[in-house]
C-alpha cells in the first residue's frame, strides 16, 4: 500500500499550527511528517506531542526548513510574509506542494512566490473555506450584474491579535468585485475614512476592519443603491474549517503540474 503523503506544518506552536496538527493526525489520507518553528523557539528539539501538552508523537520540532521539507510531500504555511517567501523557495527545492494561508504579503513577496511556483505546486488563498470561496464567486457575479450606481462596501471582523488589515479574505472579495466590474482594485480601493472626507467617490470599493475578542472571521459585502441594498455575508465560527481546507489543498496538489493555484481550483469552482 502506498504511504500517505507527508505534511510539514510551519509555525507549529501557533493556534493555526496546532489546529493543523490535530486535523492531520485525524486525517485518513495524510500523515504528519514534520513540524517547524523559528530558531530559538522553546519548542525546537522537543517532541511535538509533549510540547502541545499531550503524549509523544515521535515528531521532533525543527528549525531547519530545508531538511524538514525534504522528508515531506506538502508544506502548510500560515506564518508571516517574510517566512512564507523563504519557505516557498525551499519547498520548491523539495518539490513539495506549498499551501499558503499567510496574508499581508507585498507585491514583491508575491513575485518571489510566483518564481518559486515555476518549480512546484503552490496553492495560495486568503481563505481556505468552501463558504468564503463560494461568496467570492457570488460577489463577482453580483458586481458584474449591477452598474456603477451600486456602491460596494466590504466589512470584515477578526480577533484582536490579527496583525494585518484589511484581511486577506476581504481583499480577495474586493478583487472579485473589481473583476466583476472590469476595474483594477488598486485604482478604486478606499481603505480609510476619517474627518471631512467629502462625498463617496462613485465606483470606489470601500474596506472596513473590525478587531476584537476572539472573533474567528466575519465578512460582509454590501451593494447599496438608492432605495435598496444587497448584503452577502459569511461567518466562520470554527477555526478548524480553515485547517480542513488547507489539508484538502495539500492532497489535491499532489498530482498537479507546477504553478500557482487557489482554492477555487481546489474546489472546482473556477469558471
Image (cartoon, grey):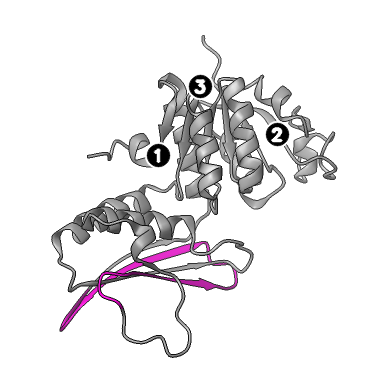
Residue 259, placed above or below residue 189: above
Label 3 to label 2: alpha-carbon separation: 23 Å
Which one is nearer the viewer's eye here, 50 or 211?
Answer: 211
Is the stretch drawn in magenta largely helix, strand or loop?
strand
SS for callout 3: loop
- Kindly identify which residue carries mark 1: 262
Q: Secondary structure at mark 2?
A: strand
State the image coordinates of residue 128 (x, y, percent, origin top left). 44, 46
Kindly identify which numbered label has been placed on residue 119: 3
Q: Please report the bounds of the magenta region as a residue range.
A: 201-229
- Where does the image place residue 210, in percent across and percent down from the top left? 50, 73
| Residue 71 to residue 230: above or below | above
Q: Nearer the viewer, mark 1 or mark 2?
A: 1
Q: Which mark is residue 125?
A: none
Which is nearer the N-term, disc 3 or disc 1?
3
Snapshot quadrant of residue 162: bottom right
The crowd level at tag 1 (other Cα within 10 Å; few <14, some 14-19, many 20+) is some
Amino acid at each position: 500500500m502506498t504511504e500517505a503523503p507527508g505534511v510539514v506544518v510551519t509555525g507549529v506552536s501557533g493556534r493555526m499550527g496546532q489546529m493543523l496538527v490535530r486535523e492531520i493526525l485525524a486525517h485518513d489520507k495524510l500523515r504528519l511528517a514534520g513540524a517547524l518553528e523559528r530558531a530559538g523557539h522553546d519548542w525546537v528539539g522537543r517532541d511535538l506531542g509533549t510540547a502541545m501538552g499531550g503524549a509523544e508523537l515521535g515528531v521532533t520540532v525543527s528549525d531547519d526548513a530545508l531538511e524538514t521539507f525534504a522528508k515531506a510531500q506538502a508544506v502548510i504555511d500560515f506564518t508571516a510574509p517574510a517566512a512564507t517567501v523563504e519557505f516557498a523557495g525551499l519547498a520548491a527545492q523539495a518539490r513539495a506542494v506549498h499551501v499558503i494561508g499567510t496574508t499581508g504579503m507585498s507585491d514583491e513577496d508575491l513575485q518571489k512566490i510566483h518564481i518559486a511556483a515555476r518549480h512546484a505546486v503552490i496553492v495560495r488563498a486568503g481563505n481556505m473555506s468552501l463558504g468564503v470561496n463560494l461568496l467570492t464567486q457570488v460577489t463577482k457575479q453580483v458586481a458584474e450584474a449591477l452598474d456603477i450606481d451600486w456602491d460596494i462596501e466590504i466589512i470584515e471582523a477578526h480577533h484582536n491579535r490579527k496583525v494585518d488589515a484589511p484581511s486577506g479574505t476581504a481583499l480577495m472579495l474586493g478583487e472579485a468585485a473589481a473583476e466583476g466590474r472590469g476595474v483594477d482594485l488598486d485604482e478604486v480601493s478606499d481603505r480609510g475614512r476619517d474627518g471631512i472626507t467629502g462625498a463617496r467617490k462613485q465606483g470606489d470599493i470601500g474596506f472596513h476592519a473590525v478587531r476584537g475578542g476572539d472573533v474567528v472571521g466575519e465578512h460582509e459585502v454590501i451593494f447599496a443603491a438608492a432605495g435598496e441594498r444587497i448584503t452577502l455575508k459569511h461567518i466562520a465560527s470554527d477555526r478548524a474549517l480553515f485547517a480542513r481546507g488547507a489539508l484538502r489543498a495539500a492532497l489535491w496538489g499532489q498530482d498537479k503540474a507546477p504553478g500557482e493555484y487557489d482554492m477555487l481550483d481546489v474546489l472546482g469552482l473556477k469558471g
